[in-house]
Image (cartoon, coloured by chain):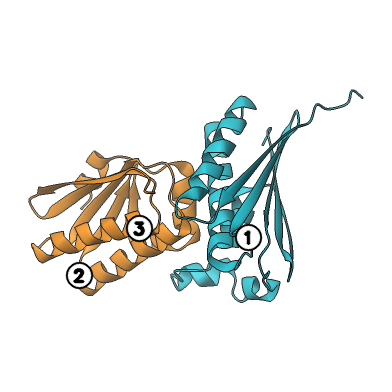
Amino acid sequence: MASSFNVNTRTEDGYAVIQTDGYLNGPTAEKLAETAKDLMSQGYNTFVINLERTRLVNSIGISILIEIIELLDEHGGALHFCHLTPVIERTFKMMGLTQHAEIHPDEETATTNL
Amino acid sequence: MANQVRREVTLNIPIHPNMELVAAHTASIIAEIMDFEETHIDEIQLAIIETCINAFEHSNSRDSKVTVTYVLTDDELQLKITDHGTGFGMEKTELLSGEARAQAMQKRGWGLEIIREMMDEVDIKSSDEGTIITMLKKRDN
């Protein structure tokens, strides 16, 4: 049984926006990581992950987001998040994501701060 | 003082990928009925998800299921999550402070810390007969 989850991407000059839709757990975060790796192979290493359509992220999903951050760090890239619910933002801060990734209220603010 | 009305819902969920969502969605519906704020509903859902996936991954449950009991009163929601697994030692959960683990961007082992952060009260009883995690969320926080 799989819960519904989708990833949509949009590439711009020098960065890519990844929009998730659905519960972010181990398997779905792996799908997101594969998308990020695919974009990196195309030369993108600055990402905005838009979580507007994701209400729940579990700790395993967050651990995979940390792996994406580590991968981008190795390649001189950067990860930005936007549209986090208060609970997702709090959990990200607890687990140390915000030391290496920036959080923005919306996509416009995120993309103007890249 | 008038007696509080107490209602109870019990759910047995099999240990299977994404079944934690069944427990979380049930909690969400109950919390909505109880007029919890949206952020508190998210907190309850995340706490129950973390509790369930801990049980799924680590309990070695003999009956391959987790029982979730939701107890509703006028002003609080109590969640009791029971597995019949092999239990776990509490010392494993307190090796490093949350801050030290965040600093090191430790990837795994955050479940209990997240549960404690999201809920008002958390009680854990674990033995080789299984684990019972009881959590409480007050409505007026």
**Where is residue B50 shown, x and y percent of the image?**
54, 55
Q: Nearer the viewer, mark 3 or mark 2?
A: 3
Q: Which chain is cyan?
A: B
Task: Report how far apart the C-alphas of labels 3 and 2 lie in the structure.
Answer: 26 Å
Task: Report how far apart the C-alphas of labels 3 and 1 lie in the structure.
Answer: 25 Å
**Where is residue B69 shown, x and y percent of the image?**
69, 43
Number of other residues with Cα within 10 Å of mark 2, as a class: few under 14, some 14 to 19, many 20 or more: few
- Say what secondary structure mark 3 lies in: helix
Give the residue type that dot 1 points to.
Answer: Asp
- Say what secondary structure mark 1 lies in: loop
Which residue is labeled 1 in the image? B63
Q: Nearer the viewer, mark 2 or mark 1?
A: 1
Q: Nearer the viewer, residue A85 or B48?
A: B48
- Label 1 resides on the chain identified as B
Which residue is labeled 2 in the image? A76
Q: Nearer the viewer, residue A20 or A90?
A: A20
User: Relative to B111, is A38 on the left or the right?
Assistant: left
- Say what secondary structure mark 2 lies in: loop
- Label 3 resides on the chain identified as A
Residue furthest to the right in view is: B1
Which residue is labeled 3 in the image? A27
Number of other residues with Cα within 10 Å of mark 1, as a class: few under 14, some 14 to 19, many 20 or more: few
